[in-house]
Image (tube, grey):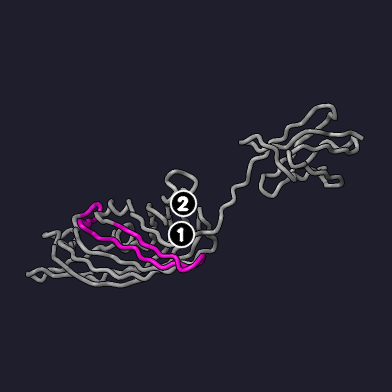
């Protein structure tokens, strides 16, 4: 037989930890620390691997060959987060600026698992990348969220969204292909609706000085189809076609939509 002795302490504070369970690797023998974290443990000499377990700390496994040294075992504390207490969140969507829009999000929590809210994008100076179409308008996306997991620091959710929007294009451009005149421009105003679904997560900086700040990221699919005519004719009766691909790949009607929101949760 051999007798081990030592103390188990908190990795950061170096204070002794009470009630740490000490076992051989396969748990044939066990012992426990006292209120100051001290222990003695007598086992057959063949055992060299030992586990140190506590409900609030990460389990540690050490090899101990000699019975003559005094052991100091340091355990790192587990991060445990309490239940969510936040009732309201407001955030800004920075990437909307890339499309000439001011994007905001508000959210109210009904209970631990359910919230209601809306996204609102105000297109102050919307434009088409790699093209000349410009527009103003707005897009409102009220949503329902169900949180599969949520605590004071983080949440994981599924989201269902309805969408309504109004857009004023000036200009809306049509192309004739390789015939002159090559382009025909007009103005077009319309209301439109749609819907979508997404999955996402948020993370709150609750253990820092910015304890109310949070980041919310989700990705999903949306149906938000613009109702403009696909063809137009100039005063001479010449036919032109509109190419809307940009609207559905990066524009307000993107089929795949990724949203990053940065704000405060209270």
- Residue at 74%, 44% (x, y): give it: 20
**On screen, 166 above or below 22?**
below
| Residue at 59% over, 51% down | 80
- Residue at the spot of label 2: 204
Q: Quadrant of residue 231?
A: bottom left
Quadrant of the rendering where the N terminus is positioned: top right
* Residue 171 falls within the magenta-colored stretch: no
Residue lying furthest right: 1
Element at badge 1? loop
Per the image, label 2 sits on a secondary structure element best described as strand
* Residue 50, position as x, y percentages in the image: 79, 39
In the image, is residue 121 part of the stretch drawn in magenta? yes
Real-space Cα distance between discs 1 and 2?
10 Å
Which of pointers 1 and 2 lies earlier in the amino acid sequence?
1
Q: Position of residue 240 (x, y in %)?
A: 17, 66
State whether the magenta stretch is mostly helix, strand or loop. Answer: strand
**On screen, 219 above or below 42?**
below
* Quadrant position of the C terminus in the picture: bottom left
* Residue 170 image position (x, y, % from top left): 15, 62
Horizontal arrangement in the rendering, residue 98 relative to residue 10 (left or right): left
CB under 8 Å between discs 1 and 2: yes
Q: Camera-side residue: 40 or 148?
A: 40
Chain part drawn in magenta = 103-131
Residue 86, disc: 1
Residue 203, position in %: x, y?
A: 47, 52
């Amino acid at each position: 037989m051999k007798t081990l002795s030592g103390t188990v302490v908190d990795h950061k504070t170096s204070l002794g930890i009470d009630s740490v369970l000490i076992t051989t690797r396969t748990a044939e023998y066990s012992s426990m620390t006292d209120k100051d974290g001290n222990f003695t443990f007598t086992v057959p000499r063949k055992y060299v691997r030992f586990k140190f377990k506590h409900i609030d700390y990460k389990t540690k496994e050490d090899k101990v060959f000699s019975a003559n040294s005094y052991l100091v075992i340091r355990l790192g504390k587990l991060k445990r987060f309490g239940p969510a207490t936040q009732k309201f969140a407001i955030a800004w969507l920075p990437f909307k600026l890339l499309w000439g829009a001011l994007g905001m999000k508000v959210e109210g929590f009904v209970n631990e698992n359910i919230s209601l809210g809306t996204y609102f994008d105000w297109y102050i100076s919307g434009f088409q990348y790699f093209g000349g179409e410009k527009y103003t308008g707005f897009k409102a996306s009220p949503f329902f969220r169900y949180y599969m997991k949520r605590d004071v620091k983080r949440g994981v959710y599924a989201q269902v969204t309805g969408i309504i929007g109004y857009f004023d294009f000036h200009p809306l451009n049509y192309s004739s292909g390789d015939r002159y005149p090559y382009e025909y421009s007009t103005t077009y105003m319309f209301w439109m609706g749609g819907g979508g679904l997404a999955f996402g997560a948020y993370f709150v900086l609750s253990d820092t000085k910015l304890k109310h700040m949070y980041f919310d990221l989700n990705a999903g699919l949306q149906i938000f189809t613009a109702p403009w005519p696909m063809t137009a004719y100039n005063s001479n009766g010449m036919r032109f076609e509109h190419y809307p691909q940009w609207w559905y790949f990066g524009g307000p009607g993107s089929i795949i939509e990724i949203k990053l929101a940065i704000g405060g949760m209270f």
